[in-house]
């Protein structure tokens, strides 16, 4: 049912960390780090004056800015030149584990089986379909390798086939700013129509008449998704009708079709509040009516089944959410009737609606359970999961009239699987398990566990760990500790073929399920945001102290990593407890919190006031300033630090890490490495090709392993 996704869901899977308190033995000693020019810029708010010496770096069109970024890249390359061969070896090692000629599990929808596959040596996927049977002739929808060959960056998303199977809409981004051009392709002739629509989210939704297409546009400056348009095929974009304009700058808007295909839905969401408008999909020129008008603090998601809308909501202080339903003609909240009540110890995450079954995704003590509830009133039951720590969730359940549920399962030691469970017969089939090539992987050679670290306020913080058998808890083992802790995003434990390159060289990997995420339910999130944000940082530090006290590692061998808001996490942590870490990687880090949150022209800012607070409020201003990594850089002996960013990043602008690094260069003490690498062709998610992304990961791994004294 949920139509929103947390930030960075696909990005986190590629990230790891490293660094050290001592410089690399083989790094050159005579290379001078670049220094950014100091240009005084005074910023005042609430009578408080901040001098920002590197504010000028926020102009990507300035040749002086580009020169500084390139000098930082050159310094990084020289300081890591001795690891280049190791990086190449790591890249080949990780690539060798991947089944290059891979194929997704086909799914059936509206008369066709849809597949995504890769050919050996290719960077990008091929999207195809087969009519009625998997033995039918393959019809290529898109060969992204051909489409991307003239671009340094290429991202295709939002494939959306019309109900009559004759047209497909899709979005393309060639700059990595997540501003997609929307195209339409004729699947009978192969022609791509000339009616290209600029500056969209890339997604779209067809009306049931096969000629009306609905899409979302972004604000040109803030990149906020703020307008819903209706496009009639064959007409120019200038004739498209604006259906909805979300004028509240703290909200984003989007459009989708219910699984029943009977309703078009316009959603408006902020951190704390949601609102939906509905229209009959068979009447795409019709009027959208509000289902339940927005009430601050009321969150709800909707889907349709028979004569009711089903609603996952926090209505009436249901902190962990509950399921309700309402008649199609009486949709205001006073008509909502409870289906599954609120429970203090169970987070209701999502529901999937089928003709004969309701499938409920619930989180209990941090672990997801899938509960199957037949509509005919037969007893409900849970799918069994027996691992101590794992990740499970429904996936690709596009068909409505089926008894077969698809779900994914993985753990820190178990490659990801797609499993099909027949809810009528109880028969279960593993459709695919990710292959680990090379002949060396045996999951029985690895151990995963979940431990509980006491926080300073007595709260127990869950930690998921994995290491190879033989790992000794004598304080000498290297541990990579990862965290995120924002937006209620849950960083569940997952298997990674690339992570084996660390585990096989003696590392343990730990995920700290800190507050600010939603691992232990919605209150876990509420205790790590706004004026409680520092719980996120102290939780991470307390997990580090626990790993050291329990003998998993020591400060000489503990590494930390975070990306985006997780970059804020590690940035704050090394200001608070730099002595705990041998090294840190901060990937696309959100580190200039106060300045960014005061600038409402920057993408994402206004929509995040309910996450971080609005610094125009004096209480929030001073609280943010007290932890903002950039504002709190001090003469400290920081760990060795690798910072990564992308010039075209629309989520965290490149100048935040650039300013942070420039300021640390002038203030830090000791001889620890401070390196920054800017991908001049990419944005928040890094390189677009699957192997180019591995090269970036190999760079990070080599940095980490070299600091630990491992060079092969």
Image (cartoon, rainbow, N blue to C red):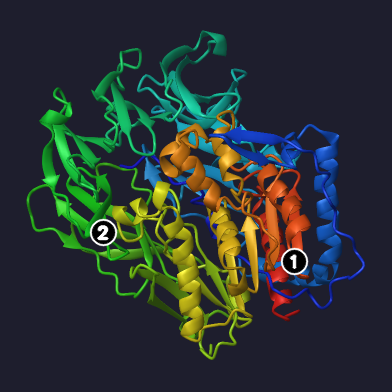
Q: Nearer the viewer, residue 140 or 469?
A: 469
Instruction: Tell me which numbered mark, 2 or 1, is placed earlier along the sequence.
Output: 2
Badge 2, how many Cα within 10 Å: few under 14, some, many 20+?
many
Q: In the rendered image, which residue does mark 2 sit on?
A: 370
State the image coordinates of residue 637 (x, y, percent, origin top left): 69, 68
Query: Mark 2: which secondary structure?
Result: strand
Labelled disc at residue 669: 1
For the question of whether residue 183 can be seen, the reply is no
State left or right for residue 404 relative to residue 43: left
Q: Position of residue 341 (x, y in %)?
A: 13, 49
State which quarter of the image contains the N terminus.
Answer: top left
Residue 200, numbered label? none
Q: Residue furthest front?
A: 47
**On-image quarter of the C terminus:** bottom right
User: Dots 2 and 1: beta carbons under 8 Å?
Assistant: no
- The residue located at (51%, 29%) in the rendering is 224
207, above or below 665, in the image: above
Left or right: 588 as drawn, with respect to 395: right
How far from the left and from the top, in percent, is residue 413?
46, 75
Q: Is residue 301 visible?
A: yes
> Who's the residue at 56% across and 53% down the image?
568
Write the residue at 68% across / 38% down. Answer: 147
Q: Nearer the viewer, residue 617 or 338?
A: 617
Count of marks overlaid on the render? 2
Q: Nearer the viewer, residue 46 or 296?
A: 46
Residue 320 at x, y percent in the picture: 24, 51
Q: Nearer the viewer, mark 2 or mark 1?
A: 1
């Amino acid at each position: 049912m949920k139509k929103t996704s947390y930030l960075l869901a696909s990005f986190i899977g590629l990230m790891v960390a490293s660094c050290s308190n001592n410089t690399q033995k083989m790094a050159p000693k005579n290379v001078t780090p670049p220094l950014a020019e100091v240009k005084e810029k005074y910023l005042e708010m609430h009578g408080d004056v901040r001098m920002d010496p590197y504010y000028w770096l926020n102009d990507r069109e300035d040749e002086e800015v580009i020169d500084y970024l390139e000098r930082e890249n050159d310094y990084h390359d020289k300081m890591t030149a001795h690891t280049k061969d190791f990086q190449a070896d790591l890249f080949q090692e990780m690539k060798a584990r991947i089944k290059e000629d891979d194929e997704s599990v086909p799914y059936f929808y509206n008369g066709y089986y849809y597949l995504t596959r890769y050919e050996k040596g290719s960077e990008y996927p091929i999207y195809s379909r087969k009519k009625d049977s998997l033995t039918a002739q393959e019809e290529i929808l898109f060969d992204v390798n051909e489409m991307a060959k003239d671009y340094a960056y290429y991202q295709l998303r939002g494939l959306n086939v019309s109900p009559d199977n004759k047209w497909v809409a899709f979005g393309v981004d060639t700059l990595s700013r997540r501003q997609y051009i929307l195209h339409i392709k004729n699947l009978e002739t192969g022609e791509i129509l000339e009616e290209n629509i600029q500056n969209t989210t890339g997604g779209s939704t067809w009306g049931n008449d096969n000629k009306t297409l609905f899409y979302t546009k972004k604000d040109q400056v803030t990149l906020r998704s703020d307008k819903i348009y209706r496009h009639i095929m064959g007409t120019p974009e200038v004739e498209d009708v604006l259906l909805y304009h979300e004028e509240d700058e703290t909200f984003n808007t989007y459009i989708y079709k219910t699984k029943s295909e009977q309703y078009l839905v316009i959603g408006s969401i902020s951190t704390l509040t949601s609102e939906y408008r509905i229209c009959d999909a068979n009447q795409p020129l019709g009027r959208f009516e509000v289902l339940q008008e927005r009430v601050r603090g009321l969150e709800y998601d909707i889907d349709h089944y028979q004569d009711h809308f089903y609603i996952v909501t926090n209505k009436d202080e249901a902190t962990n959410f509950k399921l309700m339903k309402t008649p199609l003609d009486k949709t205001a909240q006073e008509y909502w009737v409870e289906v599954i009540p609120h429970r203090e110890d169970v987070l209701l995450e999502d529901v999937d609606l089928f003709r004969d079954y309701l499938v409920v995704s619930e989180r209990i003590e941090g672990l997801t359970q899938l509960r199957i509830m037949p509509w005919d009133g037969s007893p409900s039951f849970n799918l069994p999961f027996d691992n101590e720590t794992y990740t499970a969730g429904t996936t690709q359940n596009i068909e409505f009239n089926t008894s077969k549920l698809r779900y994914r399962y993985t753990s820190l030691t178990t490659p990801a699987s797609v499993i099909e469970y027949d809810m009528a017969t109880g028969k279960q089939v593993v459709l695919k398990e990710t292959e680990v090539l090379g002949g060396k992987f045996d999951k029985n050679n690895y151990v995963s566990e979940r431990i509980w670290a006491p926080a300073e306020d007595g709260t127990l913080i869950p930690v998921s760990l994995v290491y190879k058998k033989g790992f000794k808890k004598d304080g000498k083992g290297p541990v990579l500790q990862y965290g995120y802790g924002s937006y209620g995003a849950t960083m569940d434990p997952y298997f990674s073929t690339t992570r084996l390159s660390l585990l096989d060289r003696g590392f343990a990997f730990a995920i700290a399920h800190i507050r600010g995420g939603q691992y232990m339910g919605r209150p876990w999130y509420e205790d790590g945001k706004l004026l409680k944000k520092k719980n996120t940082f102290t939780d991470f530090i307390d997990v580090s102290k626990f790993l050291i006290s329990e003998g998993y590692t020591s400060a000489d061998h503990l590494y930390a990593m975070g990306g985006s808001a997780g970059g804020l996490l590690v940035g704050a942590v090394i200001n608070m407890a730099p002595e705990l870490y041998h090294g840190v990687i901060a990937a696309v880090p959100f580190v200039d919190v106060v300045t960014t949150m005061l600038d409402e022209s920057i993408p994402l800012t206004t929509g995040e006031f309910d996450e971080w607070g609005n610094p125009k409020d004096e209480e929030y201003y001073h609280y943010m300033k007290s932890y903002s990594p950039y504002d709190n850089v001090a003469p400290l002996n920081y760990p060795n630090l690798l910072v990564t960013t992308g010039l075209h990043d629309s989520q965290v602008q490149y100048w935040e890490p650039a300013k942070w690094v420039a300021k640390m260069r002038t203030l830090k003490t000791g001889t620890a490495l401070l390196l920054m690498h800017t991908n001049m062709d990419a944005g928040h998610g890094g390189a677009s090709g699957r192997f180019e992304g591995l090269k970036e990961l190999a760079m990070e791994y080599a940095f980490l392993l070299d600091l630990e004294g491992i060079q092969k």
